[in-house]
Amino acid sequence: MIKIPKVIDLVVKNDLCIGCGVCVYQCPSNALEMKWNDKGFLIPEISGVCDSDGGCLDVCPFNPIPKKEVTTEDDLADVYLNDATKHHSKIGKYLGIYAGYSNQYRLTSSSGGLATYVFIKLLEENIVDYVFSVKDSTKVGVNYEYSIASTKEELLNASKTRYFPVTLATVLPKINELKGKVAIVGVGCFIKAIRLAQHKNPSLREKIPFLIGIICGGVKSRFFTEYLSGKIDVELENIRKPEFRIKDLNSTASDYSFGCLDEDDGKEKTIKMREVGDMWGTGMFKANACDFCDDVTTELADISIGDAWIHPFNKDGRGTNVLISRTNLSEIIIQDGIKKGDVTIENISLENILMSQQGSFNHRHTALKYRVKRAKKRGFLVPPKRHSNYNITNDFKLVQRYRMKVRSFSLYIWAKNKNSLAFDAAIKRKLSILGYLTYLYQRKKRIIKRIQRK
Ligand SMILES: Cc1cc2nc3c(=O)[nH]c(=O)nc-3n(C[C@H](O)[C@H](O)[C@H](O)COP(=O)(O)OP(=O)(O)OC[C@H]3O[C@@H](n4cnc5c(N)ncnc54)[C@H](O)[C@@H]3O)c2cc1C
């Protein structure tokens, strides 16, 4: 009888796979390979004979039956983030909280450019010899992928946010051939997978001395890129170099555009994201696993970097980062950057960092218990979660239910007919209902707050 790898049996079959591909690295019998599924995500498929050693499951960030000592991000933080002197249940262990930007890389980056700055510093100071980051792919139909950078130029090419599925399986299996140390950038679940891999393979701890965490509000299917390109009349086969965060220096930070090169006529085409509509609060094109992630600020990285979606930083179209340092090395890099005048960074309060990701905390923490309960009731396995003890009001439950519907419907509709006009027409009713339910929920919340203040 053919054995099924545990990660496929327990994670992929429960629609919990996020595509990090660390299972491919861990599999001792090369039985797994990353492939595109019918929802536009990368997932592992069987490509060889499985010996069921189970290692694939041990490194999975959405493993529904994790080992006791590494059950949650808190357990892993206790192992890997011993420098951190402070802790907050919503953002994890930390040393400092900041907002700012790189004076040199801000304009060539998606936000404040601090991710690129930190990587370049790591290389220049010989802390690492390689960086695994995300850049253009030469593969047909694949816009971006993880690749290995060892020069400043390569890192500059890997700047900018790519809301596109990428997998560490393109680089991690090569790590043991590389002489020297490696830093890796990733969203929360990818960083968790690397920590799990370090726990399983202790030599990886020395090999990977630094992790940059990208604060993430949800991983998008490749359908997201296809849909946005359709909105600017670019055919699927002609999409080149999609840019997800084209800044408008005369406007606010959130007023950015999507754009891509149309291979057909060689022209750059763009559209303001505000004309497309809300792609984040609705859950459109998002992976199901993200609804079962409670790590809003990439708690297991040495340094976590996101967008400063708070006043006054959000007024500046050039982009500003929020930053959470969690290890001494990340603190040294920040303080050294300030001293040398490379970066403009200021301390911000805990309240400010919470406010900068308010929507994400509300969805991922406050409403988590409801989604977990619902998934279990339907017979799906779910990983053990923190933050699953809040009870939410019936109106918020309705918002949750419709968000889940919009999420899965968006993937289903686009898979059936990759035409953005037809897609808009098909999803319109569900989006309108979600919009109305969200309006009612937020209005009630505001009224209750006003009454409580009196
Ligand atoms: C899927 C996704 C969701 C996000 N959601 C939020 C959010 O909800 N709130 C928030 O504050 N910030 C979010 N961000 C982060 C934000 O968009 C910026 O990436 C971050 O602020 C760093 O900005 P920067 O200017 O310093 O980065 P840059 O200097 O432009 O460098 C970006 C770095 O990220 C790497 N990268 C690009 N795409 C990916 C990817 N898909 N996976 C892993 N690494 C990648 C690049 O290789 C590069 O090293 C998200 C990013 C992604 C990729």
Image (cartoon, rainbow, N blue to C red):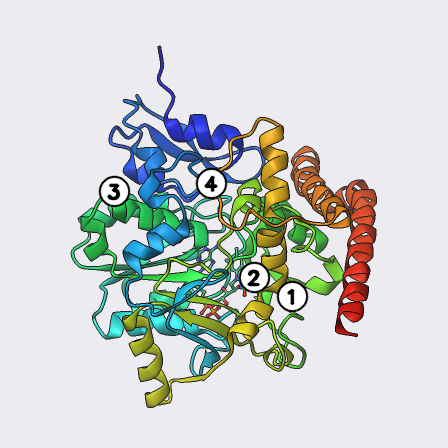
Determine whether 148 is above or below 290 in the image: below
Compare marks 4 and 1 and give the one earlier in the sequence. 1
Q: Quadrant of the C terminus?
A: bottom right
Q: CA distance from mark 4 to mark 1?
A: 37 Å
Q: CA distance from mark 1 to mark 3?
A: 42 Å
Q: In the image, residue 336 lies at what x, y percent?
A: 31, 83
Q: In the rendered structure, which amino acid carries the disc numbered 3?
A: Lys
Q: Of helix, strand and loop, which one carries label 3?
A: helix
Compare marks 2 and 3 and give the one earlier in the sequence. 3
Q: In the image, residue 413 lies at what x, y percent?
A: 71, 37
Q: In the image, residue 423 lies at what x, y percent?
A: 75, 43
Q: Is mark 2 within 8 Å of ligand 1?
A: no
Compare marks 3 and 4 and give the one earlier in the sequence. 3
Q: Of helix, strand and loop, which one carries label 1?
A: strand
Q: CA distance from mark 2 to mark 3?
A: 36 Å
Q: CA distance from mark 4 to mark 2?
A: 36 Å
Q: Is residue 162 left or right of residue 213?
A: right
Does the residue at mark 1 contact the one at mark 2 (Cβ under 8 Å)? yes
At x 66% / y 48%, what residue is drawn? 284
Q: In the rendered structure, which amino acid carries the disc numbered 4?
A: Pro
Q: Of helix, strand and loop, which one carries label 2?
A: strand
Does the residue at mark 4 contact the one at mark 1 (Cβ under 8 Å)? no
Determine whether 437 is above or below 370 in the image: below
Does the residue at mark 1 contact the one at mark 3 (Cβ under 8 Å)? no
Q: In the rendered structure, which amino acid carries the disc numbered 1?
A: Ser
**Disc 1 target residue:** 257
